[in-house]
Image: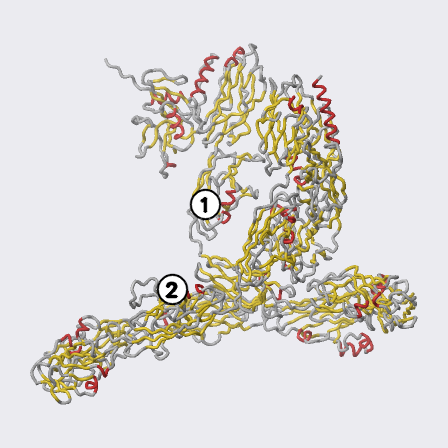
Amino acid sequence: MEIMNAFIALTIFIVLENLEPLRGAKLVLLNKEIHVERGRTAYITENELQFNISKERDSCKVEVVLNEPVTQRVGKLTPQVFDCHFLPSEVKYIHNGCPLLNEDRVMLRVYRFTELETAVEMFTLHIVIRSPKPSLVQFGQASLEVPEFFGISQPIDRNILTFKYNGLGKACTVRILSSELLFPAVGQVVVEDSKIQKSEDVCVSTLAGQPKPPCPSNGACHSGLKEIHLLKMSCEDFLEMRLRYQHLSPPSPDKDYISIQVEIRDKKSRFQLQAENVWIPVRIKGAIPNRQPQAAFMSMFILEIDEFILTPLTTVTLDAEDEETPRERLLFNITKPPPQGYVTHLDDHSKAITSFTWQDLYDTKVAFQPSNISHSERQNYEVRDGILFMNSFPIMVHFSIRSAVTNAPRVAWNTGLDLLEGQSRPITWESLQIVDNDNLDAVQLLVVEGLYHGWLTIRGNKGFRFSVKDLRDGVVRYHHDDSDTTKDDIVFRIFDEKHSARHRFPINILPKDDTPPFLVNNLVFELEEGITVLIENHMLMATDFDSSDDYILYKISKPPSAGELIKQHFPDGPGIPVFSFYQRDLFHGLIYYRHFGGEIFQDSFEFNLADSQEPPNLSDPQIVMIHIMPVKDHLPEEVPGTTRHLVVKETEIVHITKDHLHFTDAESPDSQLMYTVTKPCFSPASPGVYDAGKLIFTDSMKNFVKNSSIPFLSSFTQVNSRNAITSISYNQHAITHMKVAYMPPLMEMGPDPLFVQFEFSVSDQQEGVMTGLLFNITVMPVDDEAPEIFTNHLKIEEGTSTFITEEHLMVTDVDTKNSDIQIELKKLPLHGHIELHGLVMSEGDKFTLWDLHSSKVRYQHDSSETLEDRIIFSATDGFNTADGTLRIIPVNDEPPELQPGLRSSLECLEGERVFITAEYLYATDADSEDSRLIYMIARAPKHGVIQKDGFVVEKFSQHDITQGSISYVHTGGEIGHSYLTDSVTLIISDGEAGTVDGCCADANSPPPVPLHPSLPVYDLNISVVPINNQRPTIQTGEMFVVEEGSSACVSLKYLDASDEDTTPEELTFFLETSPQYGYLENILPTPGHEKSNAGVNITVFLWTPAGYINYVQSKHEHLEPSSDHFMVSVSDGFHKSLAMPFYIIIDPVNDEIPSLQLRNLTVMEGDIKAMGPGTINVEDFDVPQDVLRFYIATPPRHGVILNGIYGRDTGRYKQLSPAVLHKDLEIHSFTLEELKQGLMLMYMHDDTESLEDSFTIQLTDGKHTVQGTLYIFIPPVNDEIPHLSRLAVEVTFYNKVISSVSLEAEDKDSLRNQLHYVINNKPRYGHLKLKTASAWSTLHPGMNFTQDDVDMNRLWYFHTNVLSPESHDSFRFFVTDGKNRSPPESFYIFIKSVAKGDIVLFTKPVTLTEGDRVTLTTDVLMATDGTGKPGKLLYAISVPPVHGQIEYINYPGVPISRYSQLDVVAQKVCYVHDNSHEASKDSFSFTISNGHMEKKGLLELNIEHNDQIPPTLLTNKGLHIVEGSIGFLTSDILQLTDVDSPVKNLTYIITQYPQYGHLYMGETVIYPGQFTQVDVDNAKVYYKHSRGGGHIDKFSFRATDKVNHGFLVNGQLTDASTEFTIQVECQDKMVPKLIVKASPTTIQNLKDGRFAIPITVHNLKVTDANSRDEELVFSVRRHPFFGHLENSGTGRLLQNSFTQRDLNQHNIRYILNPTTEVTSDTFEFEASDKAGNTIVPEILEIKWSRIELAETCYRVCENIRSLPIKLQRTGESAEPSFVGIKVQEVSARVGLDFKHSTARLVQFDPGVSFKIWNILIQDDGLEENNEVFKITLNKPKNAILGRKRELTVEILDPKAGKTSFCTFNYSPGNNYSPLASNHLSSLLKATSLPLLSPPPSGPICLFSRTKSRKCPSSWTLRDKHCYILSSIRNASWDSAEKACRKWSQGHLASVHSPREMAWLWKFANKQPFWIGLNEGKTGSWMWSNGRPVTFHNVKSRPQLSKTAEQKCAFVKKQKKWVARLCRQSWYVKLARKLHKIITRR
């Protein structure tokens, strides 16, 4: 009874639950429709949505339901959770721009949280969608269209759409939303990509209207296009990008969409002003309209459900399909929910849903929760198309709930918990109900999982286990841990004493605002002193997890000290200081920081962040740092008292102190003052002084000693190349701390003081600089250097005297004047004396330098025979002294002599050096040392020089010759190809022998007087040997001319060569490039032949004076070349000249047949028509053009060909007599030149009633003749005169349409649009205006309008003279249909007078320049009502202008919507254009009112466009190529844009060309020249690299639009050249590495029944550091033998190659051929990278396994019981394999005659080759016929089936008295199983059948035993050997021998006597078989068991004599053995030897 009460309560609860979540007060107080413009955002306010909940008492949250796909279909409501008392602009609905729906729904769930319970209410917001006014996007007349499936649309440009916005100070951007909205749905957005190379074998997608070739597999073609996924760019660039739509997925609906977002922002503040989502429609021609989805055919629509069990729905139960829509986009909408239970989503199964997606259905996430009532239920589903929102017919789904007969506890109801973050709620019986049929009180619930964010309490204490009673009492409570989580769950194990179950209890947690905001951006503000800076989002921004970011409040707790925070509503307006502001103020760009301008450069402010919660959540204090960059307004100043002068001794280093140099700056510390030496130390008085000292740092100096290695102050920089001035820097800090010093010059400065200066400047860090400052330094000399004395040898004849001068005795002192130096005679000479002023000097006497200079000192020799004398002098400056010795050498008197036997001539290579040795030049002297003899060059060589150690000399010594220092160097240049003789004349002297070793010889002293009367003279001859070291050169002479199609001799006057060191006959010409339009031939026959070689193309020929080389002009048909050239070089065998061009002038001839081109005419009846080059033309390829003459071969029948001297005046021609017409004017012939020069060739029709005519023209060029016929079509003539039917209208005082009611003309043979009214006189008191598509056009005399204009109400009369009292007006006209005209008529207009107070309006179109402003005056806009009070006439603008705005002149930038006529009179109102370029017209509509009456009006504005904006260099990314390759310049890397210039005018002018390559336009180098953006867009410009790698090349250019000067780069206008960088990468020369090569073995079963082996990255892998996987290509050199390779990605046969990426994606597979009896295959491949580097070819082996039955039939006795069926696997066995096995009844019956194993799958483990599957044969005890059943193999896994896949088993009844045996069939190479043989023996023994051998088909094996003479079962014993006949058939000798060895070490049978052979032949049933005889490695016969060969019957084998393979013996007959290849398959016999038993007697 208690259980029944629980069920009743549960049922009532379920009904209540489905009616409404929670009864009580209604939570939603107000719920109105939300109106949103399409593509825009609408904010939800309290006017649309209110809740009946007190803000102070209860917490309330609103949650947007996300798992209802039928809601929010075209938009999104944010945030997902918000407070019921939401703030303005916090909750918003964003429409995605979809044009298909006009309404949307948003499902929400409101929660009211009290302390004890949670109230929940569901409600729906209704969204009404309207069209935006005005929209940012205006669609054009043309629509985006795809011509066919897989086609490409036309580009998206201004014909498709335009953007409408005021561009002044605004930026427009476009973003593609394809990735967010999944549109386009059946296509993609593409753009042309010039990087993709187009090839002939790739299909080409075509544009609209063009034919398209078929694509492979009917797929989409990709030719030069790339897909655009994400895109964000300016609106102008979006229209210039030429995006296209590409269709991809037929069948599809006939419409698709491209979703974009247009955004308008303020350029300065970047604040978003407007945003709109727009869907661009795409029409797909050939597609059908979208159809509604329908129920799937295969679904059951019935779901079986167990009672209380949550059961998922699958696609088996419910499914739908749509031909045009993918299933994953289908939606299911529940239109009729079930009466009990509900459909739910498994993400939260406690809540019902009303819709779900097909994907959720497919993923089994949709389930049905039944109630506790067991009966079938029905539920209706409506399926919706997720793309284009089409609804299906209702689908009925049946739920069948089965009653569960079980005593296990179950969950009957589970609604979960809803609570606020941090709250606790009880788990009650209403939210979780348990049922148990036998004992509900015994049910316990235990928490086993979950409780991730909370805990349970039971009766106030923590617990994990409770009973049903606790649940009913409400003492089980869940407590949330107050973390920021939204979900939790509890998994209960529900159990009684016997059963248990698990169940999940969901918990939904609504967040609360309990966390403060936090900063995400906080950057240091940087600004200049006194500047105001906008605080942008990237500088300062905060966020909050649980409240709106817009209402985050910044509370300033510590304001800035050097500035202030202000709120500024306008960029140029005044700011208001603020101490708090909202985050939305930052978003809107209203908050600024303003610096006061003081000298404080660091500032900050401190604030706290607060959210909108009450009370607010506050963050920790935050600090923003502000860095102010000072503005320089003070310069450094010198401190008073600073001397800027330093006195220093030349030997000291002195510091520069603050007394010498000191500057200060009020804005900078002294440590930041920088001194820059702009001109280092110099001496103004001595400008030639190189070293004037330098400034140095003294920090690192250990001692103050002058040293050249001491560095300067800092790094030196060259600033003036002429004076080599360097720049040195140091600061005031270094001066103050005595770190800067002056070091005097290192060299001795002399006796005088040195005045030094250096120039410097003083600067601070704010770039304040004082320049041109000087610092003075006086360097005082110090006398610390001793004098230096130098002596030279004094040569004197014996007994004579000579003066001692400064040449012999030189004294210097750098720091003493010459007048202060004295010389003392310290030691007298031994062989003479010294005289001063003629007096002999004694030791100690002194003289001055002036005495030496004036030759007052003299040496007198005493005539003694001495070799030398010495004098010692001492020099002093008064402080220091120095000694010197003067050496005196007497002169000898014997002349030198040449050594006899010298070689007179030596050889020297041309341009080389040869050494002169003693063999060629040597002399001796009796009284001098030979090595000191001097050779003086009297006559230098003409063609060379004499050098000593590499230097040219005029004399040298004998010592130099012996040391090998003297050489002759040939310097005469090229000597030709013959020897040259040179000579040098030498004079040998000993007069200067004494000075050879001297150190101070004066090179400029005159030669001495010869000591001998004659000296020997010698001529040394040199022979210069020629060397071939010169390049030959090519000379071109006269211009080479050849007639077109003929040949000419290339003689030496046209082409010649020369070489200075080679004879002409040795020169050879090489053609580097062949001629383009011909070739060269050599007419000489080949040596040894007589036939000429004329006509043979040559590329090499010898220099020859005879004319044997001809140029043949062979290519001239349809080309007409005027010139040709080829590059030629010449070689002498060692060197080759540069290639030179040889130009050829081709003289044209008449060889082309002209082509006559005629165009048919249409001539009105009786009319005349001119025929010019457009009608009659000729195409003749001859150049120059031949004289082309036309002849009228057949004249026209209904007209005449005339010379149209009277033009088109038909009447003049008809007035002429026929004689004049045909004789004088008729033309019979004419030339093409006459026709082009203006010949009026006319055809005149004879006015007959003919519809067509023709004449034949014959054309000749003097050599060829062609003719053609020109056809003339003659339409009938209109000859009816139009007439008028209505002619008057009544007009009010303003304007009136003139319709067909008042003006109508009729013409029976003309259309109404062909009737033209031509105006003669216009109206006097008004204007006649015609309304066109874009503006009004005023009609003047001579202008016209049509009757169609009148019918369509386009003709209006505007009355302008409002003050005129006239009551009528008129205009005159006539009507014409093009030929006939009516008489002139007048149209009268009756003007109706108006009463006082009526408003009369006059407007006139206004013209202004683009971006300009125009004032509205009474000339263009005037209204009056007759009262004379213009101030009472008010204009109200109803439709504002699109491209500008109306504003007051005094308030620029502020648009107005109202003004008065008085404002117009006062010229206060103006129109301002927004500088947009889209349209040439604008207008605005208005309503004018005087308080009593209203009148509507329109003012038109005509905008004239000017090109005022220079082009913008938008993209300049540079180019990356590999050396030696080419790279195209595309718009992706180089793009020039201009909003007001056509693309063809955007030009790049090259100013600097690339260094390592060239720019090409097509095949031509761009030099000199330019190219346009169109050339770049069309991929016509490319860069070709020519030399070098791994460097950067570049070219410079200037851009222009041919109007403006300069172009924009990064927003800056410039006229300077811009560089385009080309990165040339080194060519990849590294060969890829093969790191993985493993045989694939896994077999896949394909759906089409084939078997495949995947080849993946685990089998083949190649790596290359410089290549991506898709660039590593495997080329198949040899395909597999037995199967083929296939690419699963394309589904096609693999032709020649695949990539590493294909291997990574498992796209490559090997397709097996199951008909071949093989288990492996191979293919050969090689891998290469993108640079062509290739590895060595490799071979990959593919292995697999084959499974089959061992035998194909069994014949067994009925009483055999178990029959094992043997399966065998061959081939690869390293992996597991499976095969299915099936038993089929024939005559035997399962269960009666046999039973089989229940295993239907046999598994082969790794390494296993045989498996046994058992059959049980049952003996029924009856006598009966034989019974048969079959066993079949099927469904292999990781293997293929062999040929033996079916086995027949025949059951024999022994009671029937029949005797038989079974034949065992084996495949080749299979091993025989002893088990089968033993089993066969047992079968035969059991049935008492005679033992019969199977047919002879196998080898005979020998068996041996050591301890027994018995043979194993089934073996035969004979002569101590065991024999067995194997069942292996058709095996090779090798496999047979292998099988014998496997059986207990046996071998093939050996035969040793004819007797044994006779027995074996009989044993084998006289069938052929293998034996063990084979050729060993030595080539002689031997037995496989090692026994000696004593007998054989091997016959000759001539067919095997030529092969080296091993041969084996095959028994063909008893006495005939034949030799066969051992690998060849034959029948086999086996034998096994039994060892002899050795006994001892």
Query: Tag 2: Cα neighbours inside 10 Å, few (<14), some, or many (≥20)?
Result: few
Q: Is residue 8 above or below residue 649?
A: above
Q: Quadrant of residue 892?
A: bottom left
- For marks 2 and 1, give the one nearer the viewer: 2
Which quadrant does the C terminus fall into? top left
Kindly indicate the quadrant of the structure image that contains residue 1413: bottom right
Q: Which residue carries the number 2 mark?
A: 737
The x and y percentages for residue 1345 are 83, 67
Front-most of 112 and 20? 112
Report the side of 1171 relative to 1805 (left or right).
right
The answer to whether residue 1114 is seen in the rendering is no
Q: Quadrant of residue 1188?
A: bottom right
In the rendered structure, find residue 1623 and report the number of the disc placed on it.
none
Residue 951, image x, y percentages: 26, 74
Amino acid, disc 1: Val
Q: Could you tell me which secondary element the residue under label 1 belongs to?
A: strand
Relative vertical location of residue 569 with respect to residue 440 in this rendering, above or below = below
**Which of 1506 and 1964 lies nearest the eye of the viewer?**
1506
- Would residue 1219 be found to the left or right of residue 1720 on screen? right
Q: Is residue 212 visible?
A: yes
Question: What residue sits right under mark 1 in the picture?
Answer: 1662
Residue located farthest toward the front when viewing the structure as drawn: 641
Q: Looking at the picture, how far across and down is residue 131, in whole percent?
A: 75, 51
Q: Amino acid at mark 2?
A: His
Q: Nearer the viewer, residue 1122 or 814?
A: 814
Asked which secondary structure carries label 2, the reply is: loop
